[in-house]
Image: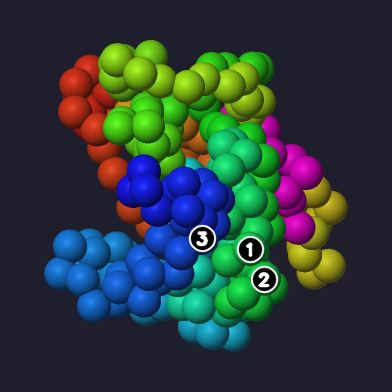
Amino acid sequence: KRGIQAMLGYRRMLYLIARFRIWLLPRSHKQKEFIAFLKLIKATATRQSLSQYLVYDIGANIGVTACFLSRFCPGAAIVAVEPLPDNLAVLRRIMSRFHLDNVAVQEYGLGETPGSFSLSVPIISGVKQHTRATLSSQQATYPDMASITVPVKRLDDLDHMIRQDPLSPPGQSTPVLALKIDVEGFEFPVIKGGQSVIRRYLPIVFCEISVGDNRENVF
């Protein structure tokens, strides 16, 4: 990857990786759980009723999962949450390329406590590992890492993302149909910060859980 990065530039390399993964995902046996998640969403809500829902892509990265959530949930509002600037740039380019008009990008991380946190990105052989960026201090154990400070909010506090239903009482929010969570060891704080949303709407949850204390806490 180092040679490719030098030739293309980091963000263009990520964009090409995203395009390849979008092509590969439905063909990959390794993605069978995510495909099952998409099918479960589709089976739960009809195309007509999808417009009543929000779907959160927490840890949207470079837009691969947002692309498929948009395709499988064409009427729903897909909220793509991603704090890393390089990933955000590629995510927006993917949205433009695939006309993901129902995807809204939120440029921050989610956790248990709002504030500013250090986001660590491992560097291996001179290449930033965008898929391993983490807000978890336990996961930030690589010998060479880049760090930036990013804003973090709670899922329960995202009032600005509420869409009003004209047939509903004032202040009633749009139901959350599904949560996809892939945050490299920060799953438990994300879930803790979204307990009210989870209890209220009982969404379908697809969550990649890292090993260690975080895994034990989630379960």
Question: SS for tag 1?
Answer: helix
In the structure shown, which secondary structural element does the residue marked by tag 3 occupy? helix
Q: How crowded is mark 3: few (under 14 residues within 10 Å), some or many (20 or more)?
A: some
Q: How many labels does the image show?
A: 3
**Mark 1 and 3 residues: CB-CB less than 8 Å, in contact?**
yes
Residue 93: which disc? 1
Q: Can residue 84 be seen in this view?
A: yes
Residue 96 disc label: 2
> Residue under circle 3?
15
Q: Which badge, 3 or 2, is on the more N-terminal residue?
A: 3
**Per the image, is 92 magenta?**
no
- Residue 154 in the image, given as x and y percentages of width and height: 59, 30
Element on which disc 2 rests? helix
Q: What stretch is highlighted in magenta?
A: 154-163
Residue 176 in sight: no
The Cα atoms of the two marked residues, 3 and 2, are separated by 12 Å
Tell me: residue 124, above or below residue 158. Answer: above
- Amino acid at the residue labelled 2: Ser
Q: Residue 114 carries which label?
A: none
Q: Residue at x 44, y 48 (%)?
A: 5
Q: Relative to residue 172, is residue 32 drawn left or right?
A: left
Amino acid of disc 3: Tyr
**Left or right, 106 with reference to 15:** right
Asked whether the residues under the numbered discs 2 and 1 touch, taking CB atoms below 8 Å apart as contact, a structural biologist would say yes
What residue lies at 62% left-to-right and 25% top-to-bottom? 150
Crowding near pointer 2: few (<14 within 10 Å), some, many (20+)?
few
Nearer-N-terminus badge (1/3): 3
Q: Indicate which label's residue lies in the foreground, 3 or 2.
A: 3
